Amino acid sequence: MDQGHEGEPIVGWRVWNLSEDEGPVLWPAGSGADPWPWRRSYEARCSVPRILTGRRRRHEAPDVDCRCGIYASATLELVARTRPAWPPAPVLGRVSLWGRTIEHERGWRARFAYPERLRLVCVICAWVEPGPGVPAVVHAFGGRLYPLCDEHAGGIEVPDGRRTRRAATDPDALQARLLDAYAVEVLPVDELMPLFGRPAAPPAPPYFPSIRTVPGPRDR
């Protein structure tokens, strides 16, 4: 059963989506809808529809009777490989959690958080199939940025046939701007090599919509 507590910050693993308007901005991947601000704490707010909670009163996040809060995982091994219907999250890192924090079977959810270390990763190597993991190009799609390695540089196609497009952005320069914007250090790539080397996700059933990689020039 979940138990709430407050104390020293807890450090866990988290992934983020990424956009670049006036600068690189982290966005939640999964729960949450607000962008993560630069150089100040991110505060959770409950955005779970009340019809799903069976409750009417408003509450601060996280709450033991709700799913709200800022999530972080205890280990990277808890993230399973899948073939999603949308390009997965391109930023991986460690995050500090504090304030009211509730522990659950996979990690924690908290009221306040801020990134501790960040790194851009090839979204295919990290979450779908093995590869070098280190971005060589950056693609854009739906207002978000998706780094890809040399092996997956052809891009990503979503189920309706639309494809990511290569952006005029260098991945190293993008990562440098991201680290500067949030005033954090880079996450060492050595910590992520086991993630990049995991077996590929099983093929999705024919009736299940999923992304696919676009062959690069060397694969055609």
Image (cartoon, helix red, strand yellow):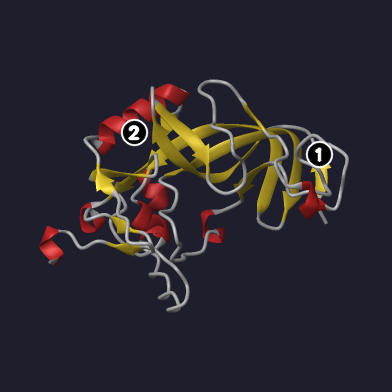
Cβ–Cβ under 8 Å for marks 2 and 1: no
Circle 1 Cα neighbour tier, 10 Å, few/some/many (<14 / 14–19 / ≥20): few
Circle 2 Cα neighbour tier, 10 Å, few/some/many (<14 / 14–19 / ≥20): some
Foreground: 220 or 192?
220
- Residue 32, quarter of picture: top right
Q: Is residue 187 visible?
A: no
Q: Which mark is residue 5?
A: 1
Q: Which mark is residue 103?
A: none
Q: Is residue 194 visible?
A: yes
The residue located at (12%, 59%) in the rendering is: 217
The residue located at (43%, 56%) in the rendering is: 86
Q: Amino acid at mark 1?
A: His
- Residue 110, quarter of picture: top right
Quadrant (top left, top right, bottom left, bottom right) of the N terminus = bottom right
Question: Left or right: where does residue 30 sit relative to residue 200?
Answer: right
The residue located at (45%, 61%) in the rendering is: 85
Q: Which mark is residue 175?
A: 2
Give the alpha-carbon distance from disc 2 to disc 1, as whole Å: 34 Å
Q: Amino acid at mark 2?
A: Gln
Numbered disc total: 2
Quadrant (top left, top right, bottom left, bottom right) of the C terminus = bottom left
Q: Earlier in the sequence, mark 2 or mark 1?
A: 1
Secondary-structure class at tag 2:
helix
- Label 2 vs label 1, nearer the camera: 2
Q: Is residue 78 above or below residue 189?
A: below
Q: Position of residue 108 (x, y in %)?
A: 69, 47
Foreground: 194 or 172?
172
Q: Position of residue 203 (x, y in %)?
A: 40, 76
Secondary-structure class at tag 1:
strand
The residue located at (46%, 62%) in the rendering is: 84
What residue occupies the far front of the structure in this picture? Answer: 160
Foreground: 161 or 32?
161
